[in-house]
């Protein structure tokens, strides 16, 4: 019962915005000076941060956390969040969430290399999809146990240990996946997949002048030049299904018209998600250096989003620290049409304004590796063993998000 007082006190100062039913207002000043601040052995990036005056149950029940008034415009007057599928322990709702507007379907991939999935060295992960029309029926039914059908997508030839998420329909009306590779003999690759049966695939690139990448993680299309930019990380090695790194961890750029393949950024620990600002003049790259998969955590390594300027010639310059995030690591990353930056982190999806200030959260109370705007005002969030459907006011900035 502390909560209404807390909200009222904050709103007294913050104009007359009505707080949506599923939203919680958090005043950043309310936790700058805490009575007790626990040491790293007890409070670190694996623990949730629950704002003072709030319980974890309240934080989950009202998942849209407003840290700055700018977040009201993003969530609109009636944001909603619903679980539309569950998968026990197998993390099938992991990454590569991508929308196919022509059929209003959403594709995603299972975690490659996760022990609970049994994927990695012995077998590849799988690609699956759902129908958004059916997801909306499930939500509208009001039956919290109802689930959407999850359908296997048999890519042919298969996409080995798929990951990442990229421009789908805006890249030649197909879906681009990164593949992390498998053992010594299946090189990491970028795959193009037909989003319609027979789901035929073509390998776009699988080497840098004859050398294997380490394990490709994410890919994005730059809206200015239409080229593919992708990250090469270490997770295949850190999940025991790839050999030790044979290249630095870098961001690469591929022009599929000319075949030109170049490295555009280095100096990372473990580069992960990549996206561009709405007009493509900034690139955002996440570094999940603090997370070494089977080999534990390093709390002093990056959990950070870096921003680059994208020059007219497509090269990167002006690397700067855009945001350091807590809790967890920043995995997938996307922008909305206003240039706000969203990332899947240890407690759900967090949102920063273009100046790097945290303005709000979609708080799940658990790690969201990836998410995607799927048309105006809709978002799918992949939280390993749960798939969420959210409605809000914002719109994604990737061209195919805007149908
Ligand atoms: C983080 O804190 C939790 C207890 O809250 C502890 O179990 C865990 O070992 C800590 N992690 C690190 C890396 O220190
Ligand atoms: C709710 O959904 C579950 C799972 O599909 C189903 O078994 C149950 O019959 C549904 N309940 C109602 C009232 O429709
Ligand atoms: C790759 O090959 C080397 C050399 O034969 C071998 O030692 C290593 O175990 C292999 N790694 C994997 C992941 O298969
Ligand atoms: C799939 O096959 C069709 C028909 O041959 C072809 O036009 C298309 O480019 C193929 N797509 C991929 C990703 O291989
Ligand atoms: C891109 O967008 C930014 C932010 O809105 C703006 O400052 C910049 O002028 C735009 N650049 C181009 C080339 O359109
Ligand atoms: C942890 O990360 C920091 C910063 O990258 C690095 O200096 C340090 O060596 C790492 N520690 C371990 C044990 O790997």
Image (cartoon, rainbow, N blue to C red):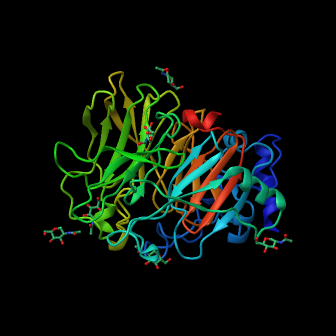
Q: Is residue 252 visible?
A: yes
- Residue 243, by quadrant, is bottom left
Relative image position of residue 136 (x, y in whole percent): 75, 53
Residue 318: give x, y in percent of width and height.
34, 33
Left or right relative to 185: residue 197: right
Q: Is residue 193 above or below residue 365?
A: above
Place residue 82 in its image quadrant.
Answer: bottom right
Judged left or right of residue 64, residue 124 is left
Q: Residue at x 38, y 68 (%)?
A: 113
Residue closest to the eye, 201 or 69: 201
- Image quarter for ligand 1: bottom left
Counting every numbered tag in the picture gives 0
Residue shown at the point (17%, 49%) measured from the top left: 211
Q: Percent x, y for residue 290?
A: 37, 62
x%, y% of residue 330? 47, 54
- Residue 164's place in the image compared with 45, above or below, is above
Residue 119 versus residue 371 in the image, above or below: below
Q: Is residue 175 left or right of residue 24?
A: left
Position of the C terminus, as image quadrant, is top right
Which residue is most to the front?
Answer: 198
Would you say 363 lies left or right of 94 here?
Answer: right
Determine the residue positioned at 69% across, 52% down.
Answer: 390
The residue positioned 68% from the left and 46% from the top of the image is: 378
Pick whichever, 383 or 36, lies toward us.
383
Q: Nearer the viewer, residue 381 or 64?
A: 381
Does residue 285 appear in the picture of this structure?
A: no
């Amino acid at each position: 019962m502390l909560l209404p007082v807390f909200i009222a006190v904050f709103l007294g100062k913050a104009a007359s915005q009505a707080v949506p039913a599923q939203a919680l207002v958090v005043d950043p000043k309310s936790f700058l000076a805490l009575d007790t601040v626990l040491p790293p052995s007890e409070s670190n990036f694996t623990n949730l941060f629950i704002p003072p005056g709030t319980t974890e149950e309240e934080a989950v029940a009202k998942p849209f956390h407003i840290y700055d008034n700018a977040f009201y415009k993003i969530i609109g007057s009636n944001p909603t969040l619903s679980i539309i599928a569950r998968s026990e322990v197998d993390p099938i709702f992991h990454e590569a969430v991508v929308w196919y507007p022509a059929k209003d379907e959403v594709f995603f991939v299972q975690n490659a290399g996760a022990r609970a999935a049994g994927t990695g060295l012995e077998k590849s992960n799988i690609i699956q999809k759902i129908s958004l029309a059916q997801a909306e029926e499930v939500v509208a039914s009001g039956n919290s146990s109802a689930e959407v059908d999850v359908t296997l997508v048999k890519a042919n030839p298969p996409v080995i240990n798929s990951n990442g998420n990229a421009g789908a329909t805006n890249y030649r009306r197909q879906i681009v996946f990164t593949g992390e590779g498998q053992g010594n003999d299946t090189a990491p690759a970028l795959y193009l997949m037909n989003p319609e049966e027979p789901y035929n695939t073509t390998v776009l690139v699988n080497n840098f002048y004859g050398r294997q990448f380490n394990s490709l993680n994410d890919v994005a299309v730059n809206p200015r030049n239409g080229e593919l930019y992708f990250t090469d990380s270490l997770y295949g090695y850190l999940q025991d299904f790839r050999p030790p790194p044979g290249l630095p961890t870098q961001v690469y750029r591929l022009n599929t018209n000319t075949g030109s393949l170049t490295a555009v950024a280095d100096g990372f620990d473990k580069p992960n998600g990549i996206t561009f600002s709405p007009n493509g003049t900034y690139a955002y790259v996440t570094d999940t250096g603090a997370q070494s998969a089977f080999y534990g955590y390093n709390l002093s390594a990056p959990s950070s989003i870096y921003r680059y300027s994208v020059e007219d010639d497509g090269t990167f310059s002006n690397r700067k620290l855009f945001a350091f995030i807590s809790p967890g690591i920043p995995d997938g990353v996307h922008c909305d049409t206003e240039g706000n930056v969203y990332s899947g982190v240890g407690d759900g999806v967090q949102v920063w304004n273009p100046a790097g200030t945290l303005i709000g959260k979609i708080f799940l109370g658990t790690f969201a590796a990836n998410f995607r705007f799927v048309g105006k005002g809709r978002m799918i969030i992949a939280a390993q063993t749960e798939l969420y459907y959210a409605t809000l006011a914002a719109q994604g900035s990737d061209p195919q998000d805007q149908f």
